[in-house]
Amino acid sequence: MKRYAWARLGLGLWVAGAGALGVGGIRAASGQTPSPTIGSQQNRSSSFNPATTIPFRVSGELFLKGHRPVVSLRIFNVLAQLVAIPILRGSGKALDSLALSCPTALGCNYNAYWDGYVTSTGKLASSGVYIYQLEIDGKRSTRKILVK
């Protein structure tokens, strides 16, 4: 699996560079879990600290019949090395295979928060471009982040 990590991240970078906003899902046949619609948006960061918020949306069709979509969000540097796993705002839980719930059938908006620290070293991330990969029930969306 690690063998193809570079190829997956490279493809994600290409998609992010092309300006794609996410991956659109197609309604699945009855009896199957529908494909997610990933609506990741550009991150919001402060010019005074490296913390950033990453908004994303999960479509309501994923929450039908009590299904709870599993979400992961990871931040990588340009060398495809894992930098951090942000937390889900409001819950304080890491977005690492986290099952989400939503009170409405229309879908829900969520915000991921990254404090700007590199998980492995505990130091602040340096300024530059990073890549985040949002995965919802196996469907991925990749975008760029600028850390100031």
Image: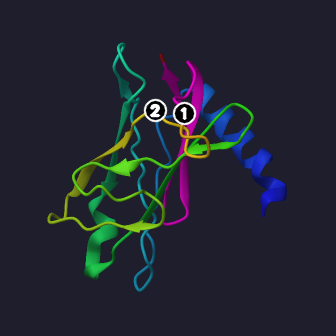
Q: Position of residue 9 (x, y in %)?
A: 70, 43
The answer to whether residue 33 of the structure is visible from this angle is: yes
Q: Residue drawn 27% across and 75% down?
A: 64
Instruction: Please name which of the two marks, 1 or 2, marks the residue nearer to the observer.
Output: 1
Q: Residue furthest front?
A: 122
Query: Residue 128's quadrant in the figure?
Result: top right
Residue reaching furthest top? 47
Q: Position of residue 39 (x, y in %)?
A: 39, 44
Q: Nearer the viewer, residue 143 or 122?
A: 122
Q: How many discs mark residues in the rendered view?
A: 2
Examine the structure image and report whether residue 126 is included in the region drawn in magenta. Answer: yes
> Label 2 is placed on what type of residue?
Gly
How packed mark 1 is, by other alpha carbons closer than 10 Å (few <14, some 14-19, many 20 or more), is: few
Q: At 41% from the left edge and 29% from the top edge, which residue is drawn?
A: 42
For label 2, the residue is 116
- Residue lying farthest to the right in this orientation: 3
User: Residue drawn at (51%, 22%), measured in percent from left and top?
Assistant: 146
Mark found first going from the N terminus, 1 or 2: 2
Residue 74: x percent and y percent?
A: 54, 48
Reply above or below: 135 against 19. below
- Residue 84, disc: none
Q: Is residue 40 above or below residue 5?
A: above
Describe residue 65's horizontal placement relative to residue 95 as left or right: left
Which quadrant of the rendered structure holds the N terminus? bottom right
Range of residues picked out in magenta: 123-147
115, above or below 146, in the image: below
Instruction: State the residue position of label 1.
Output: 123
Q: Position of residue 123 (x, y in %)?
A: 54, 33
Q: Secondary structure at mark 2?
A: loop
- Amino acid bearing label 1: Lys
